[in-house]
Image: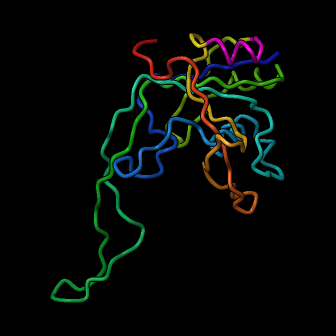
């Protein structure tokens, strides 16, 4: 038996996996192990003590949304460039424009094997990545089986990265809490993750 908490938000949210320019590299539609571990640490701060980066309470997740909207953002690099000629000697920081994907009306399902963990999670908001990207929990905790969660493509549709290293897996990042050990996973798509309406 598993216990599922549904999170959703009515606004646009910066794609949590958009750490690169989408115009150069189109990011995948999934949450990485480090993002799920970060959500878990927010819900259960006691896990921060002696943190090894492993996911301990969330046993599955599923993410769907309405669309990805491309938004422009003005940035400046951290470093300074030296201008060493002419009257305008000094340092400057140039501006640049990058495109970030914003997911519209995301829905995230988190699954737990412990009902108490699900109750604790259902009373808190979460952030997909940045502090302003808030998703709110539904009042109801759904009690079902892992088989139903994996096969009910109408209710639990979405993208899920299965955190294991198999022949189908690909590199999804490095665990900074474990000497930058590589993290692998393979993508599971259930139902229609990109919805036309909810």
How far across and how far down the image is residue 127, in percent? 57, 36
Q: Is residue 90 above or below residue 51?
A: below
Instruction: Kindly identify the residue that appears in the image at 25 percent across and 88 percent down.
Output: 84
Q: As drawn, is 183 to the left or to the right of 64?
A: right
Q: Nearer the viewer, residue 16 or 168?
A: 168
Asked whether 145 or 128 is in front, the reply is 145
The quarter of the displayed image where residue 1 is located: top right
Image position, residue 170 (x, y; %): 61, 46
- Residue 160 in the image, given as x and y percentages of width and height: 61, 30
Tell me which secondary structure the magenta stretch mostly adopts.
helix
Q: How many marks?
A: 0
Q: Residue at x 33, y 47 (%)?
A: 99
Residue 149 on the magenta span: yes
Q: Which residues make up the magenta segment?
A: 143-152
On the image, which quarter does residue 92 sit in?
Answer: bottom left
Q: Is residue 22 above or below residue 123?
A: below
Question: Does residue 193 appear left or right of residue 197 in this picture?
Answer: right
Q: Residue at x 60, y 34 (%)?
A: 187
Residue 191 covered by magenta stretch = no
Relative to 85, is 132 above or below? above
Q: Nearer the viewer, residue 186 or 135?
A: 186
Query: What residue lies at 62% left-to-right and 19% top-to-bottom?
Result: 6
Extreme residue toward the front, this view: 167
Judging from the image, the colouring scheme is rainbow
Q: x, y percentage for residue 134? A: 53, 32
């Amino acid at each position: 038996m598993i216990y599922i908490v549904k999170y959703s938000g009515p606004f646009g949210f910066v794609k949590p996996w958009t750490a690169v320019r989408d115009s150069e590299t189109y990011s995948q539609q999934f949450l990485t192990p480090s993002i799920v571990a970060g959500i878990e640490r927010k819900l259960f701060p006691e896990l921060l003590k002696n943190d090894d980066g492993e996911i301990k309470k969330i046993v599955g997740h599923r993410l769907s949304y309405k669309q990805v909207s491309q938004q422009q953002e003005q940035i400046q690099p951290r470093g300074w460039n030296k201008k060493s000629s002419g009257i305008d000697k000094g340092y400057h920081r140039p501006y640049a424009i990058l495109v970030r994907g914003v997911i519209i009306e995301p829905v995230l399902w988190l699954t737990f094997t412990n009902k108490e963990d699900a109750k604790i999670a259902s009373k808190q908001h979460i952030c997909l990545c940045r502090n302003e990207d808030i998703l709110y929990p539904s009042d109801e905790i759904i009690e079902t089986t892992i088989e139903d969660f994996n096969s009910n493509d109408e209710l639990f549709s979405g993208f899920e990265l299965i955190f294991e290293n198999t022949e189908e897996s690909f590199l999804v990042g490095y665990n900074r809490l474990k000497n930058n050990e590589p993290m692998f996973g393979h993508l599971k798509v259930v139902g229609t993750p990109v919805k036309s309406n909810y």
